[in-house]
Image (cartoon, helix red, strand yellow):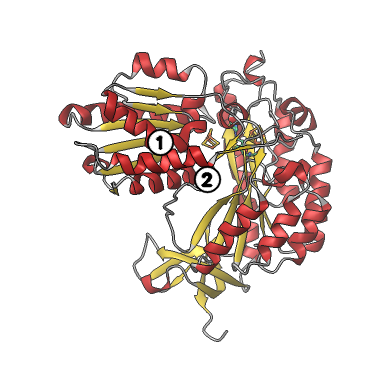
Amino acid sequence: MQKEPIFLSQKELDEQIWAMAAFQAVEDRPRSFHIVTYGCQMNAHDSEKLSGMLVRMGMAETEDRRHADLVIFNTCCVRENAERRALGNVIWLKQLKNEKPNLLIAVCGCMIQQPHMAERILKQYPFIDLAFGTHNLYRLASLLLELADKKHRVISVSPEENMIAEGLPVKRLNDYKAYVTVMYGCDNFCTYCIVPFVRGRERSRRMEDILREAEKLQKSGVQEIMLLGQNVNSYGGGKDFPKLLKALDGIGIPRIRFMTSHPKDLSDELIGVMASGKNICNNLHLPVQSGSNAVLKAMNRGYTREQYMERVQALRSVVPDIGITSDFIVGFPGETEEQFMDSVSLVDAVGYDAAFTFIYSPRVGTAAAKLKAQVPAEVSAERIRRLIQAVEQSTARVHQSLIGSTEQVLVEGVSKRSRTMVSGKGRRNITVTFAGDTRDTGKLIQVKINAAAANTLRGERVTTE
Ligand code: SAH
Ligand code: SF4
Ligand code: F3S
């Protein structure tokens, strides 16, 4: 059961809006900012909210962090290397601060929300001016005002877990595609995962707020929305997501995506909406994590390999051209060679378009971190190589099968490799490149696929539509 969320009161929102205005009267205030974002789409969207607030406070975003008066690190802690990268880069900023004493350094996001982190920042990173957790993001304006007032560092990590803040300004990265959060947090407590601890309990936005946001995006010409949630299909306690998706489909935005979907909540009703929807893209990220029932049980995933396969088949029977992608973890504590091979065979059985593969990383506070039988690093490294190979073969088969088809591509810009080519994603979420120029950016173009490479498809624009 999802708890009822507490919505940010009008009074608190007004306080923040007031702080954004008041900040502009501060002498020696920062004039420019740069945000470095780690982690998932949730964090990317949070950074868009941070940008929105900072712009309202009279600051301009700068591409080069060396020119910024304020640098914010929006961190991730889902695996140890994500954390290590963020902290390594913060140290680099320490040198910059020596040259530029007025530089403000802030860190926020999931890493900071961990219980032991605030203390560590206080002790080990004295050059960090401001640190705030995921539940305090909406308070950025008052935190910066406090920092300017007191002239000492501000650390703000609260355990408030059930808050939804509507009405904050957002500065979106793109004007043709947009993130729309539908729910926050996670209640699943997969035994390896830190996310429920740093993002709080599941809570869903009001349907009318989501629809209003989507309508505004449609009017502004947005071509694609990506609905966000740790488990989007747990929206409204698991029963309301099909209804929401259907309503969004009716708004008329040409492309709708959503992630992440939990296999246990992929209902027949949702599959039905995906099949009948006009604008819902034929792609589903459905992370399986492992192909072994024993490992899935130890991970607390709530489904078996057979149940997962049954859901994939149910979906394919009504959406035959659906592209399915996944996440896998190798080297979960106690994983045997045979259990690992079950993941390899599942890649073939499903025929994934693509999959992210991760080596298990123990996270403080999670149930799996306490398990004894940790898999040696070299065994995991060798397993992940084999799994990646299986995924690459699966991707190649899918890409080959698409030669000759026509894909609708949302162009994201000129290709990195060649100035005369543009690239973007097809509805199936595979990158497609074809001849074009910057004028194509943000447009939907039909492309006939005529070649397949490892990670992309190549094609030609279809001129007669
Ligand atoms: N809510 C999503 C994804 C959350 S994190 C879901 O349930 O699928 C993204 C991915 O990171 C997960 O799918 C998982 O594959 C991986 N991951 C999470 N915790 C991890 C850990 N401790 N070690 C390695 N990979 C992990
Ligand atoms: Fe983590 Fe599991 Fe929640 Fe995904 S469903 S965020 S993997 S606890
Ligand atoms: Fe990382 Fe937080 Fe996302 S831990 S994966 S940024 S929810």
**Extreme residue toward the bottom, this view:** 464
Task: Please tell me which residue lies in front, 458 or 427.
Answer: 427
Q: Residues within 10 Å of mark 1 (few under 14, many from 20)?
A: many
Instruction: Kindly tell me whether residue 379 is visible in this rendering.
Output: yes
Name the residue type under label 1. Leu
Expressed as whole percent of the image width and height from the top left, the position of residue 387 reads 62, 39
Q: Image check: 457 left or right of 147?
A: right
For the point 70% across and 40% down, which residue is it?
288
Expressed as whole percent of the image width and height from the top left, the position of residue 76 reads 48, 33
Task: Please tell me which residue lies in front, 432 or 62.
Answer: 62
Instruction: Kindly tell me whether residue 437 is visible in this rendering.
Output: no
Name the residue type under label 2. Gln
| 248 vs 18: above or below | below
Q: Image check: 156 left or right of 337?
A: left
Residue hosting label 1 = 140
Q: Quadrant of ligand 2?
A: top right
For the point 75% across and 50% down, which residue is it?
240
Residue hosting label 2 = 41
Residue 313 image-quadrant placement: bottom right
Expressed as whole percent of the image width and height from the top left, the position of residue 328 reads 64, 38
**Ligand 3 within 8 angstroms of badge 2 C-beta:** yes
Q: Image check: 179 left or right of 122?
A: right
Secondary structure at badge 2 equals: helix
For the point 44% across and 58% down, which residue is it?
174
**Quadrant (top left/top right/bottom left/bottom right) for the C terminus:** bottom right
**Ligand 3 within 8 angstroms of badge 1 C-beta:** no
Residue 87 image-quadrant placement: top left
Q: Residues within 10 Å of mark 2 (few under 14, many from 20)?
A: some
Cα gap from disc 2 to disc 1, whole angstroms: 20 Å
